[in-house]
Amino acid sequence: MGTYVTANPTTGTTDREFPGLKDDEVAGVAERSLAAYQEWRATEASERAAILSRTADEYERRADELAAVITTEMGKPAKEAAGEVQLAADIYRWYAEHGPDLLETEVLDPQGADASIVQVAPIGPLVGVMPWNYPYYQVARFVAPNLLAGNTVILKHASICAASSALMAEILHDAGVPADAYINAYASSDQIADLLAHNAIRGVSLTGSEKAGAAVAKVAAENLKKSVLELGGSDPFILLDSADMERTTKIAAGARLSNAGQACNSPKRFIVLDELYDDFVDGVVKQFESTVVGDPSDDSTQMGPLSSLSARDTVAEQVETAVKQGATLRTGGKPLERDGAFFEPTVLTDITPDMDAYSEEIFGPVAMVYKVSSPEDAVALANDVEFGLSGSVWSGDIGKAEEVADQLEVGMAYVNEHGTTLPGLPFGGVKRSGYGRELGRWGMGEFVNTKLRRTASE
C-alpha cells in the first residue's frame, strides 16, 4: 500500500498524507463499480443530467474552497485556479444540457428492412488516470460525459492531488452520484494494471506522460479494453506577421507561462519569420523578465512554483543540457534562490535538431524560439517532432494563416489564438500526443456502445 502525499510546492513542505489503496481491495473496487453500474445505467438520462447540473452548481458555490486547495496542492496561482474551477463547472453543465440529446436513438435508412436504428448505450465501469496540472478540468472532461452516458468511474488522480480528488468525489456524491458509481481510489500504477485486468472494467482514459500512456495502453490492449490517451505536446506558435509586436509578445508570454508552463497544449516552440525574429525575441525576453513570480495565493503573482521540487529539477536539467549542447540562454535558466519549486521564466534560442530540446517536451516556464525564412519552412519545422497535440498561426492575413494551420499535423489548429478549450470543442491529438477525443459530442462517443438494431419482416 502506497501513500498519497500532498506537498506544498510554494514552501517545499508536506501538507497532508493519505493512505493508499490496499492490494487486497483492488478487486473489490472493480466489483463495487460493476454493481453500481447496473443501477446507474438504468437511471433516466434526464436524472443523470440533473445530477451533473447540481455538480456544476456545487463547483460554483464552493469555488473559493476548490481553488484554494489546488493553489496549495500544486501551486496554481489563485486567479488561474478560480478559472479552472469555473471551466470544470461549465463542462458539467454543458453535458447536463446537451448530453441527453447525444444519447437519442438515431433512425437510419431501413436499407431493405422494416427498420434500422442506432442506439447509444453505456459499456460499464471505466478507469480514469488523471494528471496533476489541471486537477479539476482534466477530471471533468472525462467524468462528465461518461457519467451522463451511464458508465461508472474509478478515478485515480495524481499522487500529489489527494486533497482535490477527495473534494471532487464529495461534490459528486453530494450532487447525487451513488457512492460506488464514482470511486476515488488512491491507487498505485501496479494496482491500475490489476484493475484493467479485471473482467468488470471496460475501458481506461489517461492524461499524462508518454511513458505512463504507453504502459497503460499496453495493459489495456493485452486485456482487450479500450483506451483513450491524451499525452504530451510541443506545440508550435507560428508568427507570420504582426501589426503590434508588443501585444503579440505579451500574448505569447502569457500563453507560455500560464500554469508555470505546465500544460500539454502550451505553446512551447515559437517559430518566427526572420524579419520579425529579433523584435519578437527582445519582446518575449522583456515579458518574461517582468513576470511577477511568487506566492500563488497572492493576487499580484503572475506565475507560481512548479508542481514539485522534482518537476523543477527536471526542467533545470533540460535547460542546462540545452545550453551545454549549444543553445543560447537569453534569460532565466535556473531555480530561484528561495524555498519551494520556483524556476525563472526562461527563453532559449539557436536550438538545432541534434539537441535534446529540439525533440523533447519541456514541461515548465521555458520558451524556445526558432527563426525561419518562409511559411513553408515554418510548417516543416512545426511538423518535425513526434508530438501532434495543437498549434497556432498568427497573422493579419486570415486566409494565409488558415492555409498554414491546415498543414499542421495536430489535433487542434488555431488561428490568432492558442489552446482554447471549451466544453463543446473536441480536445485531443495525433502522433505521440495520443489518440481519442474528449469534450463535446466527441467525448461522449468514446466509451459507448453504438448499437445497431435492425428489424425485418418474417
Image: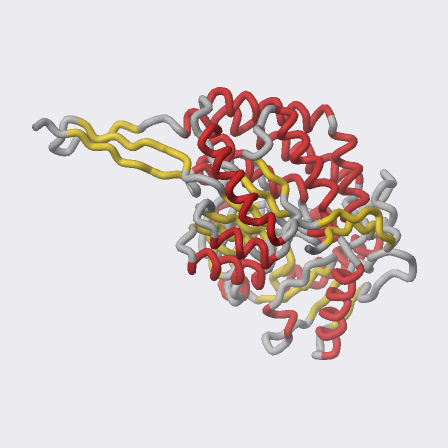
Residue plotted at (72% across, 60% down): 366
In the displayed image of the protein, which residue is found farthest to the left?
Answer: 458
- Judge left or right: residue 276 versus residue 182: right
Q: Position of residue 354 (x, y in %)?
A: 60, 78
- Judge left or right: residue 388 versus residue 450: right
Answer yes or no: is residue 430 visible. Answer: yes
Image quarter hosting the C terminus:
top left
Q: Quadrant of residue 78?
A: top right
Decide which of 447, 197 is in the foreground and name it: 197
- Judge left or right: residue 396 versus residue 115: right
Decide which of 198, 427 is in the foreground and name it: 198
Answer yes or no: is residue 400 visible. Answer: no
Q: Position of residue 226 (x, y in %)?
A: 43, 50
In the displayed image of the protein, which residue is found farthest to the front?
Answer: 24
Residue plotted at (80% across, 60% down): 309
Quick check: 218 above or below 390?
A: below
Q: Quadrant of residue 240?
A: bottom right
Image quarter hosting the N terminus:
bottom right
Residue plotted at (15% across, 33% down): 111
Decide which of 32, 406 is in the foreground and name it: 32
Q: Position of residue 175 (x, y in %)?
A: 62, 24
Residue plotted at (65% across, 58% down): 268
Q: Position of residue 249 (x, y in %)?
A: 71, 51
Decide which of 22, 134 is in the foreground and name it: 22
